[in-house]
Image (cartoon, rainbow, N blue to C red):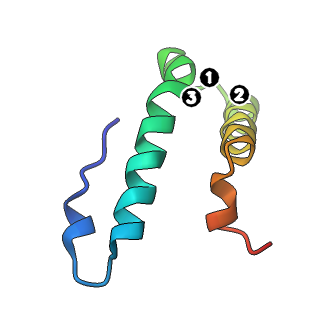
Amino acid sequence: MAIGDEHLDWPFFADRHRALAADLAGFAAGAFADLEAMGEPADDAQLDARCRTILARLAEAGFLRHAVPA
């Protein structure tokens, strides 16, 4: 599912925010394609596993540093 980026034009977003959004979008396009192709999780256990996979991939790529103070 694609999310628009029109909100990045709001005055309180700086160029660094736009660059981060572009980096994350590029990463997500490749890193999560396999998960998207799997369709919806069948149950809570599959959903939990999918969430853990997403977070692990974001962490490996260094994106969680923007959400969690070091």
At a point 65% along the width and 38% down the height, the residue shown is 54
Q: Are marks 2 and 1 in contact (CB under 8 Å)?
A: yes
> Dividing the picture into quarters, in which one does residue 43 lie?
top right
User: Closer to the camera: disc 1 or disc 3?
Assistant: 3
- The quarter holding residue 47 reads top right
**Is disc 3 surrounded by few (<14), some (14 to 19) or many (20+) residues within 10 Å?**
some
The residue lying toward the viewer, choosing from 26 and 45, is: 26
Residue named by callout 2:
46
Residue 7: x and y in percent read 24, 67
Which residue in the protein does label 1 denote?
A: 42
Q: Residue 44 at what x, y percent from top left?
A: 70, 35
Mark 1, secondary structure of its residue: loop
Q: CA distance from mark 3 to mark 2?
A: 18 Å
Instruction: Give the residue type that dot 1 points to.
Output: Ala
Tell me whether the residue at label 3 lies in contact with that at label 2, contact meaning CB atoms closer than 8 angstroms.
Answer: no
Label drawn at residue 31: 3
Residue type beneath disc 3? Ala
Task: Specify the amino acid type for callout 2.
Answer: Gln
* Callout in the foreground (2, 1): 2
- The residue that appears at 31% across and 84% down in the rendered structure is 12
Q: Residues within 10 Å of mark 1 (few under 14, many from 20)?
A: few
* Location of residue 68 (image quadrant): bottom right
Question: Local crowd at mark 2 within 10 Å, few (<14), some, or many (≥20)?
Answer: few
Q: Residue at x 40, y 67 (%)?
A: 17
Q: Secondary structure at mark 2?
A: helix
In the rendered image, the quadrant that contains the N terminus is: top left
Identify the residue at the far right of this view. Answer: 70
Q: Name which of mark 3 and mark 2 comes first in the sequence.
A: 3
Upstream in the sequence, badge 1 or badge 3?
3
